[in-house]
Image: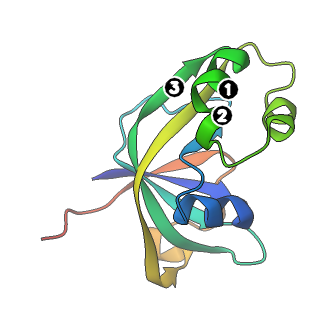
Amino acid sequence: MRKLLMSIGPEHVAHILDGSKKFEFRRTLCRRKAEAILLYATAPAGLVVGEAEILGTVMGTPEEVWARTGHAAGISRAEFDRYFAGKERAGAYVLGRTTRFSRPRTLAEYGVSRPPQSFLYVEEPERN
């Protein structure tokens, strides 16, 4: 199962896991299909604390993307505008079911030595 390992601020991870943030915004989306996002909470946590299912993507101008996602963005319009300032295109992953790990995991458990700048592909075996 292919997953994306993403560095995300702890406050945004909390909103994803509590269900108030249904979209993860990115300036560039991955090219290969992935089933989920592994949530690496940046400092001070510095751990992979959970995952979110990817239901799909939204692409367009920043204005178009906000119109489709603003209702459950988990961030303010001002934060969104700052993130996409000067960009002609915007993207978002549509998030589904989330799982908070009972035991947070280190990057080393995924064979990764440092946090990804944007994202890394991670292959995990199917669990039965």
- In this view of the protein, which residue sits in the foreground, 36 or 99? 99
Q: What x and y, as percent, mark residue 4?
A: 47, 50
**Above or below 69: residue 10:** below
> Pointer 2: what residue?
70
- Residue pictured at 83% horizontal, 40% vertical: 79
Q: Amino acid at mark 3?
A: Val
Q: Marks 3 and 2: CB-CB under 8 Å?
A: no
Q: SS at mark 1?
A: helix
Mark 2 to mark 1 CA distance (whole Å): 5 Å
> Pointer 1: what residue?
66
Tell whether 75 sits left or right of 32.
Answer: right
- Residue pictured at 45% horizontal, 62% vertical: 51
Q: Quadrant of residue 15?
A: bottom right
Q: What x and y, as percent, mark residue 34?
A: 37, 42
Q: SS at mark 2?
A: helix
Q: Amino acid at mark 2?
A: Gly
> Pointer 3: what residue?
58
Mark 3 to mark 2 CA distance (whole Å): 12 Å
Q: What x and y, as percent, mark residue 52?
A: 44, 56
